[in-house]
Amino acid sequence: MSEAKSRARRGVEKSEILEAAFDLFDTVGESAFSVRKVAVLMGIDPMTVLHHFGSKDELLRAIAERGLHSVEMPTESQNWRDDLKAVGNAYRLLAHNHPRVFPLHFRYNATGPADHISSEIVYRALRNSGLPDASAAGLGLAFYAFVLGFALAEAEGLLKAIGTAEEAELQALDPQTYRATRALLPVLKTLDPSATFEDSMDVFIAGVADLANLRQRATPVMDFDTQQCA
């Protein structure tokens, strides 16, 4: 073992490497990120980085997890609706604060402990809504698909008020064929992403409540006196 590798492994903490890697990724994004650049920043050999994280993929997973630690994850309350909103708001804040890191959350089913904490809150909320487990499992994943997709679209500038060029393009559409689009032009010019996110969360939550009621009505109730299903 070389002297440089031996010194690096003894003298550099894994947490220090992660902080440097996170800051670099947060600044330059994935296309300009590399293990070698992290090593240069730390003054260590690239193999030292891999010694601590095993692979570049595991380092990226750790960077995504580190991002979650930068926002406050909610704790479970007595209101499942509020819990879903709180988790959604936390991930949206993460996208606002670290837009270059945020896309990593689409790559991994879970990034680590912080991710599991939030998913536990989501799954408990969906079960507390009255959904059967068969529905709660899939809708938990759908919840993250919705929240992450919305937050990424917002971070990429796809959910904002339209500008002059976009307005002119919509104004040029045939008013009969695109009647609804033309009617919404005044609103699209003043679109509020935060209000849109709140409306979207309300729609998701209302759908969960309706589905829970539907599933409960469809479940046979056992009459224990006759041991028959009512």
Image (cartoon, rainbow, N blue to C red):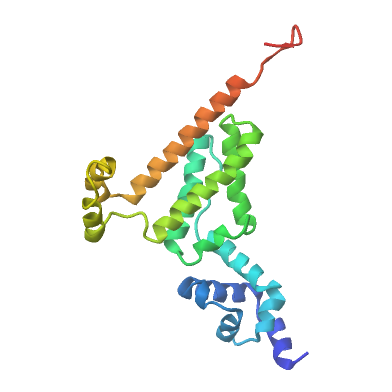
Relative to 172, residue 203 above or below: above
The percent coordinates of residue 125 (x first, y second) are: 57, 38
Q: Is residue 228 or residue 180 the one in the foreground? A: 180
Q: Residue at horizontal 23%, vertical 47%? A: 174
- Inspect this view and state whether residue 69 appears: no
| 5 lies left or right of 20 | right
The structure residue drawn at horizontal position 65% and vertical position 76%, both measured from the top left corner, is 13
Q: Quadrant of the C terminus?
A: top right
Write the residue at 58% across / 33% down: 128
Pick out the residue farthest to the top.
226
Q: Is residue 175 left or right of residue 196?
A: left
Q: Taking 211 as reference, is 189 above or below it?
A: below
Residue at the location (61% across, 21% down)? 218
User: Residue 226 at what x, y percent from top left?
Assistant: 75, 6
Vertical comparison of 104 with 202: above or below: below
x, y (%) of residue 163? Answer: 25, 58
Q: Which is nearer the eye, 63 or 146?
A: 146
